[in-house]
Image (cartoon, rainbow, N blue to C red):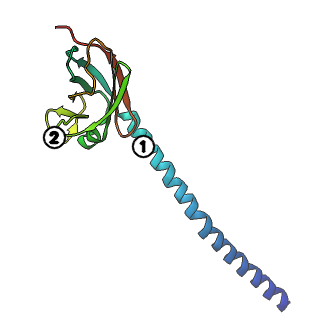
Amino acid sequence: MASEAISSAILIIGAVIGAAFMVTAILPAIFSAGDTFGTVSHAEEEKLKTDFRIVNTYTAGGTSKTVQVWMKNVGSNRISIYDLQKADVYLGIDTMYQKYEYDAGGTTGTFLYILNPADGYWDIGDTVEIKVTDTDKEIQDYSVLFTFSLPNSIRRSTTFSKTVA
């Protein structure tokens, strides 16, 4: 009888230790997976709430090397100016396509943005002007393909030609 009690106690102790090892091995993996799903869900929610529209375009054509595009924030999220600064602008003129990055000085091969009021955010309903000066190619009578892409991969494109006054 005593041997049965000892055997039962050893089995119970073994089961408790085995369960503890299982809990310490499996629970962190479960919590880690939950964090991953939460992060992905949050990123997708941000994408769904972010939206903007291209509302106007301008280029003089001819020997002009300047393109201006106005966009309105129509989403339910305001967009940080840091996201605007990290955005990519792509211009296609004739058969030449080029990527432009932000530079506040508007140096050759970059874009700048004009946003009023300058409170650090592109607020809902506000319009931002994107200006690319000194493109590598004269616009002439070519079509211009403009694409604006935010860091969270939300992008809008339009094709336009010179503006006739």
Marks 1,2: beta carbons within 8 A: no
Residue with the mark numbered 2: 119
**Left or right: 3, with 115 as reference point:** right
Image location (x, y in percent) of residue 15: 72, 75
Residue in the image at 76% along x and 84% along y: 10
For residue 24, above or below residue 91: below
Residue with the mark numbered 1: 43
Secondary element at image label 1: helix
Q: Quadrant of the N terminus?
A: bottom right
**Left or right: 66, with 160 as reference point:** left
Image location (x, y in percent) of residue 76: 31, 33
> How far apart in space, not on screen, are marks 1 and 2 (Cα)?
24 Å
Q: Amino acid at mark 1?
A: Ala
Residue nearest the viewer, comparing 53 with 11: 53
Circle 1 crowding by C-alpha within 10 Å: few under 14, some 14–19, many from 20:
few
Q: Quadrant of residue 122?
A: top left
